[in-house]
Image (tube, coloured by chain):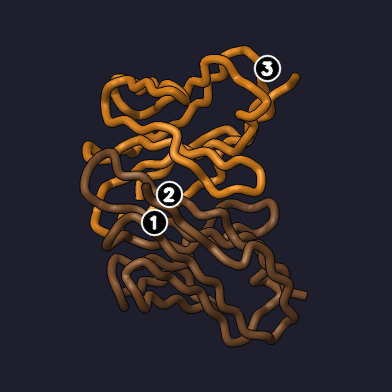
């Protein structure tokens, strides 16, 4: 499976934008880039995904490098409720649809 | 709408006792089903997945087993629990069919083995 590399932890101030980086230099042409996040004592939840173009939804934006070897999850205005572990995952949509989670980035939001 | 249920929410069991955790999904048919475990302060580890009734794939060797007796029911079991089985157990489901596929996770079961 193609691997991703993320910083172990990041800090950001409340109501400021947050840019969470992810490196995936061995990404293949069929890999989709997905982001999940896990709030304390909860299961992970889907945030956003993309293939080549930048994507926006109500939760976040995803900026994908032109060579697709890296991507950035952007939270436009962080709140205390955004404190979580953020996982960057590469997915090939095979029948088994397995997700192998890495360690993710623990995001701390400072009030 | 689809919902996923897990029970119990918390469980404290002695070493050597049996285990049965149940997960059910409503509002969808023929989902893929998954069991994950998260040890304290650690990442998520995929334990089992199933693409259909009676079809179980194991990701890591362990003293746990999984079964799928019905389309939307996934059960995690053990005959004899070990201390190392303590953790947060999460069930998830997905429906494979396109680029927007997402895995949806249940509320989890926190298991403490003493």
Query: Image quarter for residue A15?
Result: top right
Residue with the mark numbered 3: A14
Q: How far apart are the two marked residues, 1 and 3, measured between alpha carbons? A: 33 Å
Q: How far apart are the two marked residues, 2 and 1, measured between alpha carbons? A: 5 Å
Q: How far from the left and from the top, in percent, is residue B75?
A: 47, 74
Residues marked 3 and 2 touching at CB (< 8 Å): no
Q: How far from the left and from the top, in percent, is residue A52?
A: 26, 26
Residue with the mark numbered 1: B93
**What colour has chain A?**
orange
In the drawing, does residue A40 fall left or right of residue B26?
right
- Identify the element where label 1 is drawn: strand
Letter of the brown chain: B
Q: How far from the left and from the top, in percent, is residue A32?
A: 30, 37
Do marks 2 and 1 share a chain? yes
Residues marked 1 and 3 touching at CB (< 8 Å): no
Chain for mark 3?
A
A63, above or below A84, in the image: above
- Identify the element where label 3 is drawn: loop
First in sequence: mark 2 vs mark 1: 1
Q: How far from the left and from the top, in percent, is residue B57?
A: 36, 71
Residue with the mark numbered 2: B104
Residue positioned 34% across, 22% down in the render? A55
- Identify the element where label 2 is drawn: strand
Chain for mark 2?
B
Residue positioned 56% across, 45% down in the render? A103
Residues marked 2 and 1 touching at CB (< 8 Å): yes
Give the number of the mark in front: 3 or 2.
2
Do marks 1 and 3 share a chain? no
- Count residues near mark 3 (Cα–Cα under 10 Å), then give few for <14, some for 14-19, many for 20+: some
């Amino acid at each position: 499976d193609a691997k991703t590399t993320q910083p172990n932890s990041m800090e950001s101030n409340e109501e400021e934008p947050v840019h969470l980086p992810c490196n995936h230099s061995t990404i293949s042409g069929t890999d989709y880039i997905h982001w999940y996040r896990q709030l304390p004592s909860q299961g992970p939840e889907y945030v956003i995904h993309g293939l080549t173009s930048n994507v926006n939804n109500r939760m976040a934006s995803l900026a994908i490098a032109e060579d697709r070897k890296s991507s950035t999850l952007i939270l436009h205005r962080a709140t205390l409720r955004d404190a979580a572990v953020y996982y960057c995952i590469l997915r090939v949509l095979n029948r088994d649809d397995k997700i192998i989670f890495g360690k993710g980035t623990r995001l701390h939001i400072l009030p | 709408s689809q919902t996923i249920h897990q029970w119990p929410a918390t469980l404290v069991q002695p070493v050597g006792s049996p285990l049965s955790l149940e997960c059910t999904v409503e509002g969808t048919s023929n989902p893929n089903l998954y069991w994950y475990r998260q040890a304290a302060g650690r990442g998520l580890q995929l334990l089992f997945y199933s693409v259909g009734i009676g079809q179980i794939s194991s990701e890591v060797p362990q003293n746990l087993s999984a079964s799928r007796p019905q389309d939307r029911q996934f059960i995690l079991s053990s005959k004899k629990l070990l201390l190392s089985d303590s953790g947060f157990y999460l069930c998830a489901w997905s429906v494979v069919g396109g680029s927007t596929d997402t895995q949806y996770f249940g509320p989890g079961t926190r298991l403490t083995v003493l």
